[in-house]
Amino acid sequence: MSVETLYHALGLTAAASPALLLAVFGLTMLFSRPLSEKAMERCTETAVLTGLASSIGILVLMLMTGERQVPVELGNWVAIPQEHFHFHLKLVFDRLSVPFVVLTFLLVGTTGAFANRYLHRETGYRRFFLLYAMFLMGMVVASLAGTIETLFLGWELVGLSSALLVAYFHDRPSPVLNGQRVWSVYRVADAAFLIAAVALHHVSGEGDFAGLMGTGAWPEGQAGLTSGQALFVGLLLLVAAAGKSALIPFSGWLPRAMEGPTPSSAIFYGALSVHLGTFLLLRVSAILELSFWLSAIVVLLGLATAVYGSLAARVQSDIKSGLAFSSLTQVGIITAEIGLGFRYLALVHMIGHACLRTLQLLRAPSLIRDYHNLENAIGEHLQPRPGLWERWLSPAIQRKLYRLAFERGGFDAVLQQYMVRPFLAFFQLCDRLERRWTDFLAGTTSRESDRIPTAPVAEGPE
């Protein structure tokens, strides 16, 4: 077997293992033949270990042969010759994708093992692992994407599974509303991503990163765009990355996303999903070099997000929200590092931060109990040390900063007023128009799906 054939086989195995896992879980639930918890655990373990072994095998081969970029072509899945558009599915293994996909398998596998016990005998156990498999597939596809269309496919799978897992406890209104908030913000980010993809196709005639970012392997490629084109496309991609990674002004949805189960909070908003926006910036970092203003905007946005996250993390009343804003601080610093051109530093920072936050969020349910045990052992409340803010700033400025952090910068209200409400109003309008049309065709005044049975109200004691 030649080295090229071995590369191709290992690459397909790494991508196919999560796809098969999603297919098995989805089809068994679709045909009302759900697997037992033990069977789902074994399937998950097999898929993760297979993908991890394949990814590590490719890494070892690349180190032995000195290859820095290994493409795996899967051909055109959609082609429209008249519009000069094609959906080209391609995977690429390089110094960016291989570490990130290995990290994905490691952290998703760890979180899956934790969730198998954490959600034991839960009503939504199978639903969680179905969405878990969807998330794993989306992260692997996005990590290994060799074209912007392939990256968008993984991007969408991650977004869909994220919103559905935020609304995991759908018997309560709050998780459903927060899942809707996350989905609404993701739609804006996805729209910016799509416009950027269309613009890149218009400029270069293709969405292949090898053509867009030059012939050199990451991070040495040179993008074949003008400064103006780079600024336009880069700003669109920055909006997409900001929405996915909760950079300001999209930060309002991040604490709301903690409504989901602890395992999904750990792997999504502490480890992988929250870093997908910065991964996108790393993948297209060659574009940032073509425009000084674009790089400056990326740096300023990252630093502003880091300062905001640091302030907000200090006033949170629950451990998960505090960790969420602490993650936002590090994501902002990583974004600034990318804007400054420190690509390897940003990649290493991303990997280390993802591992740390996964551990912290998985420990969150028992952390408060450990803290109380420590206070009981000492015999008094632990007093925090005064930080730099307390020593350097006057009390008046501290009060203003505290109010700003307590209100989370007002970003949540801004998202509600100018993003979520118009989003919902538009789709409610579409629903009304659809209802009128279906009522006209059916000759009735209500659709079957609108007839929600009313639960009988239990009579209490007088």
Image (cartoon, grey):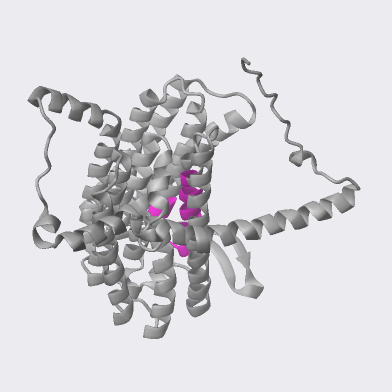
Write down the region rendered in magenta. 141-162
- Placement of 318 over or under 189, stated as above or below: above
Any magenta on residue 148? yes
Residue 191 horizontal/vertical position (percent): 53, 64
The tally of labels here is 0
Q: Residue at x 48, y 35 (%)?
A: 21
In the current view of this chain or complex, which residue is farthest to the front? 462
Q: Residue at x 76, y 37 (%)?
A: 451
The answer to which of 424 and 386 lies nearer the viewer is 386
In the current view of this chain or complex, which residue is farthest to the top? 461
State the quadrant of the C terminus: top right
Residue 97 horizontal/vertical position (percent): 33, 55
Q: Residue at x 50, y 20 (%)?
A: 36
Asked which quadrant contains residue 348, the reply is bottom left
- Placement of 193 over or under 440, stated as above or below: below
Residue 175 horizontal/vertical position (percent): 49, 40
- Placement of 203 over or under 180, stated as above or below: below
Asked which quadrant contains residue 221, the reply is bottom left
The answer to which of 169 and 35 lies nearer the viewer is 169
In the current view of this chain or complex, which residue is farthest to the right? 443
Residue 316 horizontal/vertical position (percent): 29, 45
Q: Is residue 362 left or right of residue 410?
A: left
Residue 221 visible? yes
Give the main secondary structure of the magenta stretch: helix
Any magenta on residue 418? no
Residue 65 visible? no
- Placement of 240 over or under 138, stated as above or below: below
